[in-house]
Image (spheres, grey):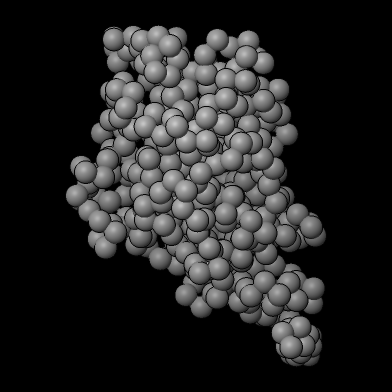
Amino acid sequence: MKKILILLTLSLSFVSQVFANKILIPMDESQKNHLKAYGIAFWLLKEHGTEVEWLLNYRGGSFLFDASQSYINECVIRGVSYETISDAESQSILAQIASPDANMDAVKLNKAPKIAVYSPKTTQPWDDAVTLVLTYAEIPYDKIFDEEVLENKLPEYDWLHLHHEDFTGQFGKFLRMRGQAWYQEQKQEAETIARKFNFSKTSDLKLAVSKKIRDFVFGGGYMFAMCNATDTFDIALAADGVDIVESPYDGDGADPNADKKLNFENCFAFQNFRLYLNPYEMEFSTIDNQQEERGVNENNDYFSLFQFSAKWDPIPTMLTQNHANLIKGFMGQTTAFKKQYIKPEVITMAENRSLGEARYIHGTAGKGFWTFYGGHDPEDYQHYVGEEPTDLNLHPNSAGYRLILNNVLFPAAKKKKLKT
């Protein structure tokens, strides 16, 4: 019966849209499935080579492209809201967007980025928000890990995601869970790879991986990180040549003067932080605004998106497209970034001002770009080890997940020079 209804809908849409020249996918509150709408845009780029215009700040960051019955069919099948409009109507919209008085812009998306997700090959006891939403939106990606990075596979990709990963080589500081099978599997995996590449410690392996990722960004790559991949990446780079790992993890003690030897010039985002060397404390440094310091709970934890000038600052504007300005907060091993440790040149795109924390930050490094997004899962406030993955069928309009997908499409855009 469901198939009959879909076929009937497609037939009716064909009859009513014969004279349409453009398809508009609205991304405001009228959209039934914001997350799958990104998948449609990616599908058009990858499978059809169809240019898509991303209408920044127009109805929540809508998509505009040439009409085709097959494109309409795909929207119907995926449950994505769309509107068919004439060329004259699309030109009117573009003229409205181009007006100097309008804080809007049209950015052309012309090539689907090739996506890599950095993830262990052993079983993980937690879900990864990015792989969840990529799968839900039907956006293809490859999984890679330390071996592929060290074998110089990164240049094959345009966009790299890092999630719940500890680049300091302390296995997430989950020492209290060392009896769990997943912990032993991941520890064994890391140590095996370290031996394969002639590293005596996992921390040395992870530093080498961090440098390869740094070089990928310097060379023009796009890196997106969440949770504790954000701060541990910078910590690893800052601690190059300094032992910051205590004996339960690597068999020898950390340098007691490690804080004084950190080189913050190596960091993408952070500076002047102090380390937490206690091996039993599940925090890495003073960067993260810990929950006991924040004084909020699930009912009152929110952060606000900044609004940027679409014509003058198109990159942060792209990365903050949304149908909501106030986003539900969510925790992670790294939840939020204390503002006093963020470098002045970094762009803060979302914050909780009352808590003095940034949740979503962005910057450039060499020829490339990076974005850090605090927290673990935008629709699971406090995701515990071993919990079931979030079912995104229940959250098709998630504003928090939209921020992830903005970053996925960002490399497809024909860039304009950042002016501020």
Residue at image position (60%, 17%) is 194
Looking at the image, can residue 47 be seen? yes
Q: Estimate the x, y position of residue 136 in percent, counting from the top left.
A: 61, 60
Q: Nearer the viewer, residue 394 or 318?
A: 394
Where does the C terminus fall, quadrant-wise? top left
Q: How many marks?
A: 0
Q: Position of residue 32 (x, y in %)?
A: 55, 75
Residue plotted at (21% across, 43% down): 292
Q: Quadrant of residue 31?
A: bottom right
Residue 89 in sight: no
**In the picture, residue 65 is in which quadrant?**
bottom right
Q: In the figure, 62 relative to 229: above or below?
A: below
Left or right of 354? Residue 88 is right
Q: Where's residue 77, x and y in %?
A: 71, 75
Q: Quadrant of residue 154?
A: top right
**Which residue corresponds to the image point at 80% horizontal and 60% vertical from the top-left?**
48
Toward the viewer: 84 or 72? 72
